[in-house]
Amino acid sequence: MAQAAAVAKPPAPPRRRRASATPRRLPYLLIAPAALLMLGFIAYPVISVFYYSLQNYNPTKPWRNGYAGFDNFVQIFTKDPQFWDTLTFSAKWVFVEVGLQLLFGLALALIVNQTFVGRGLGRAMVFSPWAVSGVLTSAIWVLLYNSQTGITRYLADMGIGSYGTSWLSDTSTVFSAAVVADLWRGVPFFAILILADLQSVSKDLYEAAEVDGASRFKQFWHITLPHLKDAIILSTLLRAVWEFNNVDLLYTLTGGGPAGETTTLPLYIANTSVDAHNFGYASALTTVAFVILLFCSMVYLRLSKFGGGSK
Amino acid sequence: MITKEATEVAPAPVRETPEPPRSVKHRRSWDEVPRWQIYTPLSIYLVFTLIPFYWILLFALRPAGSTSLVPWPITFDHFKKVWTERAFGTYFENSVYVGLATLVMTTLVALAGGYALARFDFKVKNAFMLALLCSQFVPGALLLVPLFEIFAELKMINSLGSVIIAETVFQLPLSMILISNFIKNVPYSLEEAAWVDGCNRMTAFRIVVLPLLRPGLIAVGSFAFVHSWNHFLFALMFLNNQNKQTIPVGLNTLMSADSVDLGALAAGGIIAAVPVVIVFAFIQKWLITGFSAGAVKG
């Protein structure tokens, strides 16, 4: 094809002009499918959430439906202890999860970035839980934590703890139990992203540092960490938003229990809208969650000076 | 900025001191961390990673009621039971259908949009980019009610189409940003050269750019597949009909039963994991390169 065109040289210029003349409408045509999908299934729902947040809207109690002004918001902030409880739990959950995932993920990435025998297999095994779903993670950990044939039974056989304990139904252990289950799946995400970014650190830098007699810790602190900074900021932020919003794991593992001990704000919202059919109030809660997320993300990006070095 | 200066400065001293003993020495010390410092933490972490996998295999393969820590005698009864009695065969089919459809739709739409973002300057480009980034903060879980109403309006409740659309929409923003970064890494001059040779834009894209995008597309496509395969909430909400449900919903049903059949749950879990494990084994080597090429770069 290329040859044929090279032989027929004369018609080439007009063709080229055509290729560069189309662009006026072309980019819009190209983004149209994505834009339409996002308008219809993200933007429109978001707007309707804002709209409903100012309404009393409950399909099971239609006689009360109508404009509510800021009543829903007043109720959230002044009369709803569950809102504050679940918000606090969400914050704690996100903070602990993202912190620990980053820590272990970074350590793992540094380890499997070394050259050693069995590295390929090691990487594959370390990363494997990454692809496991929240529901499957729950299924696995339900098997591990169950009181009859779970891990506690075998620990009790060895004289550790007692028979019949279930870490998921005890309010003092449920948080750690859920954290460990989510860590199992979450650490590989950070490890993969950080490992990818480690590939682009120039080896010359380490050699130079070596010549200057810098210790390995100093090399890590002054070369590796600054290089990873943007990737770390971005991945922690994405992960924090994701951990905040994701309900798969807690919904299926603990169902928010025992006694509401592990109910996050999104889980509370889901219960309010799905079980109680209180769409108006759930929408107001969603709006608040939105604003909080957006605000925290801005503050985080500002504080961490993302993309820094430019100023 | 700093990195660049340092890279330029760094090689100089090495080149000025070409004595072999020195370079051999420092090579050994930064390249070779003591073995135990690698294997000890790695083994500890592997125990943590692999025990849960072993546990589910154990429960899936040993007979009901057994408490042995070795799956012996091996039985496949749990698999048979879950596949037929618990309808995992149907769920599996539905999940495959949803996963593949999401993969195709996400990749095609993101490819078109990503190309526009990478190669053109147009009026709404910045606004569009901003919308893509903002949509990352929009929690799908919190839009369940309005989404349900939209699909009810479109008469798509209980059809797999609703789940496919919802999964695609929430995969799109990140996929598009990634793909546009991959395309930016392909020099524009390559395409221009193809135009000069008489290709139109579409042909030039197909024969010049597309082959170079392979690792990136594999990463993005498998992401979309795995994500929709695993995702649970949309299917739970939009599909009420039992023979329309997907694997994660089936697992949840098994888990929320009054007395959980642990063997069936484990077998169901393994059925859920198999395709993902296959995809994962297949793409692992592209994943790292795909990410390092496409991520982070403005």
Image: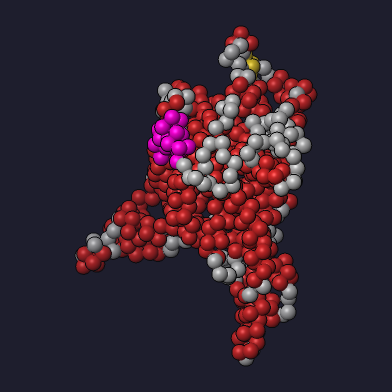
Coordinates of residue B237 in the picture (x, y in percent): 52, 27
The residue that appears at 73% across and 32% down in the rendered structure is A261
Which range is magenta?
A: B76-96
The residue that appears at 50% across and 52% down in the rendered structure is B178
Quarter occupied by residue B26: bottom right
Is the residue B248 above or below the residue A53 in the image? below
Is the residue B19 above or below the residue B291 in the image? below
Q: In which quadrant will I find the C terminus of chain A?
A: bottom right
Residue at the extreme top: A63
Of A268 and A49, the residue lying toward us = A268
Coordinates of residue B107 in the picture (x, y in percent): 42, 47
Coordinates of residue B264 in the picture (x, y in percent): 51, 35
Is the residue A288 above or below the residue A69 in the image? below
Of B190 and B288, the residue lying toward us = B288
Tell me the chief SS of the magenta region. Answer: helix
Viewed as shown, does residue A271 lie left or right of B146? Answer: right
